Amino acid sequence: MEKGLIGKKLGMTQIFWEDGAAIPVTVIEAGPCVVIQKKTKETGGYDAIQLGFGRKKEKKVTKPLQGHFKKADKGYFQFLREFRTESPYGYEVGQELKADIFEVGDRVDVIGTTKGKGFAGVIKRHGFHGGRATHGSMFHRAPGSIGASASPSRVFKGTRLPGHMGNKRQTVQNLAVMGVLADRNLILIKGAVPGSRNGVVLIKSAVKGS
């Protein structure tokens, strides 16, 4: 059965493994998440479960969402996310999922929103080398020619140019779970994951991991 949770990135630290190696890990507060809805091929066209995470006051929830949350009768939530699964029948509406559904050694994919960095030039955004930093060069950090003259008289789609950097959904695949603190709903994942502190992330069973 595929596993998935909504979590909040708390930051990074390091742990020391049995052989003395220092391993950088990201600490994620994963859950508790509540199953709000089950979708099956018969009812929704595909198999999935919808999870809620992060408590919210009733007065801040719209009337349609209040009715949706009352089916699970577990309160109101700030975040709703769907997780595809081949067997939604193993879950029940109102069921709580906590960090202990994952174990040390599991492989996971983590989805988050990268840090927004505003408008950036081609050197910061795409890693261009730029021109010489000498006097009289007149070509330092510019993108240079983009090859659009009389023909084809336009800029090709996908041309790397200055623009908005970051603030995009990104998935990091096949990360290892290095620790699970079930009593505090914390998961320690090896390496870095997208997003800033307190950013919402999705943790799912790895598609390519074994």
Image (cartoon, helix red, strand yellow):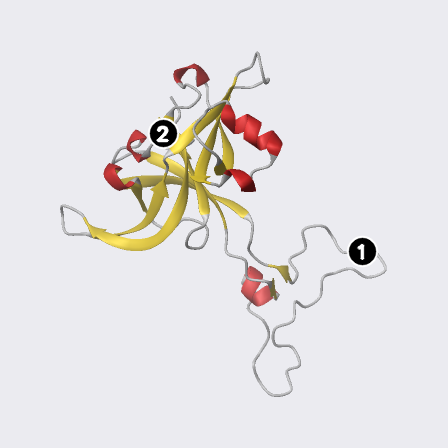
Looking at the image, which is closer to me, 65 or 170?
65
Does residue 73 sit above or below 32 in this rendering? above
Q: Residue 107: x percent and y percent? A: 34, 35
Q: Residue 139: x percent and y percent? A: 65, 77
What amino acid is at disc 1? Arg
Disc 2 crowd rating (10 Å Cα; few below 14, some 14-19, many 20+) is some
Q: Is residue 3 visible?
A: yes
Locate the N terminus and report the quarter of the image it occupies. Answer: top left
**Quadrant in the picture for residue 98:** top left
| Residue placed under numbered mark 2 in the picture | 97
* Residue 61 relative to residue 54: left or right: right
Mark sitting on residue 169? none
* Residue 161 relative to residue 74: left or right: right
Query: How many numbered markers are drawn?
Result: 2
What amino acid is at disc 2? Leu
Tell me what residue is drawn at x 22 percent, y 51 percent.
Answer: 15
| Residue placed under numbered mark 1 in the picture | 154
Tell me what residue is drawn at x 58 percent, y 58 percent.
Answer: 165
Q: Secondary structure at mark 2?
A: strand
Does residue 92 sit above or below 69 in this rendering? above
Locate the C terminus and report the quarter of the image it occupies. Answer: top left
Q: Is residue 205 visible?
A: no
* Residue 27 relative to residue 173: left or right: left
Marks 2, 1: nearer the viewer: 2
| CA distance separating discs 2 and 1 | 52 Å
Outermost bottom residue: 135
Lower position in the chain sequence, tag 2 or tag 1: 2
